[in-house]
Image (spheres, rainbow, N blue to C red):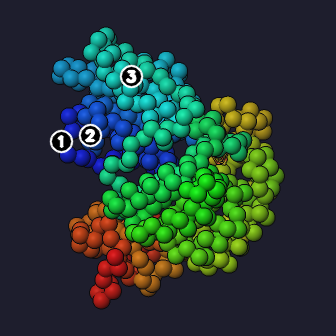
Amino acid sequence: MTETTQPTEAAPRRKLFIRTYGCQMNVYDSQRMADLLRPLGYGLTETQDDADMVVLNTCHIREKASEKVFSELGRLRLRREERRSEGADLVVAVAGCVAQAEGEEILRRAPMVDIVVGPQAYHRLPEMVARALRAAGARRGGRGAGVLDTEFPAEPKFDFLPAPTAVTGASAFLSIQEGCDKFCTFCVVPYTRGAEYSRPAAAILAEARGLVASGALELTLLGQNVNAWHGEAPDGSTWNLARLIRALAEIDGVRRLRYTTSHPRDMDDELIAAHRDVPALMPYLHLPVQSGSDRVLEAMNRQHGRDLFLRIVETLRAARPDIALSSDFIVGFPGESDADFDDTMRLIQTVGFASAFSFKYSPRPGTPGAAMTDQIPEAVKEARLAALQSSLRAQQTAFNASMAGKTVEVLFQERGRRDGQLIGKSPWLQSVHAQAPERLIGRLVEVHVTGGHANSLAGEVAAGLGVAA
Ligand code: 5AD
Ligand code: SF4
């Protein structure tokens, strides 16, 4: 799980700190919450210490991710007491998937919380904050305002969000689809994010144009099932994701396109063909497989088998030979035998992944997997995860090493830890470190790769090759 904070802005009347846990969809939502709260006088700050309001935008995907929230709330309770002794106050909001799944429980276990808001209701945040501020004026003891909204409103929140104004930089997220109807038996997403919803193409294209106008060169299309996107086209027909990608690639200034996260079952031929035909579509795909065993895939209700996944990989590579593949794996799903696990290890060897995320199965309350009787002992999960990660790490290191000596186009995004160093991304989503002047942040630059390491590439801005855009 990643944990990210938002960039700072100038001179707000009130300071807002958003701590984002979990997936890229949460990063996008945090930016939109900042957009919503700006008219109320809230500007983003980088530290919790001077914040007038703190939002925890939470993740419920695994137990570890959601437990973090309660320990953070304990710290915030003390922080509010400090603020009050200084004659100030602190509004505390919990958003995201823990808010959705455990809203009542949060208010019971952490009564200091002012606002609990689910992922589909956060467009109502300004109204909720106004109520919380009124209640804060009359605050007694340690209690919060306790305003809760975890509805799945009939109106899509996107219709109520202002145009993005948060600083997004050269690489921007664009949410195009939300929710999931697939109900994998391990997963909380269908319960926390709700049913599948695709935004209309016109709204997506307008948001993309706005992001490009504010300096974005790369757009990453987001959705829990992004390749299931099918939306109303500007001419009233229905487009699929391939068609949308072609339309986005035509926008002047769009240099790179990515999309995540996809489901194998929705990886249709047109989308694969887009990887062949659309130069802006980057040669990288995150396609979670979860397991290499048909028996486990069936128990997970994945609606695809091992063969379908391997066939997709083959077709993708025929369409775009340099495509790098990434995936998600779960080890220790209930009933997973040694032989099932070996199937997963064999699939990894057959495919060859450029990167991957892997997890021990974590039973989530309310999902069918949690009620299955043949749960796997922790020690077995640990051993399997260690073996799997060692294979995946070796593949990733080999992939990165294979880049040495090549020249790749890098989108520089931020300063590195060393003096004069910048960090950017290659087309294959590798982090690239190079000595480069700061004016190259937000630019596409040709970089000569001098070395490939386990988690990054080292490179030099090649003299004579210079700046590509
Ligand atoms: N336990 C472990 N991993 C899970 N994931 C989702 N739910 C669980 C769970 N209950 C993983 C899947 C998914 C990724 C986002 O998180 O691999 O693709
Ligand atoms: Fe969860 Fe499965 Fe839906 Fe992905 S496809 S969000 S893993 S239920």
Q: Which residue is mark 1?
A: 11
Query: In this image, 115 relative to 305: left or right?
Result: left
Measuring 49% from the left and 51% from the top, which residue is drawn there? 203
Q: Quadrant of the C terminus?
A: bottom left
The residue depicted at 28 percent of the width and 71 percent of the height is 440
- For the residue pair 156 and 458, the one nearer the viewer reads as 156
The count of marks equals 3
Query: Label 3 crowding class (10 Å Cα cut-off): few <14, some 14-19, many 20+?
Result: many
Q: Secondary structure at mark 1?
A: loop
| x and y percentages locating residue 77 in the rendered image | 34, 23
Q: Is residue 199 above or below residue 127?
A: below
The residue singled out by tag 3 in the image is 114
Residues at marks 1 and 2 touching, judged by CB atoms closer than 8 Å? yes
Left or right: 451, with 377 as reference point: left
The mark closer to the camera, 2 or 3, is 2
- Above or below, 305 relative to 151: below
Mark 3 is on which residue type?
Asp
Q: Residue at x 35, y 21 (%)?
A: 132
Q: Which mark is residue 21?
A: none
| Residue that mark 2 sits on | 43
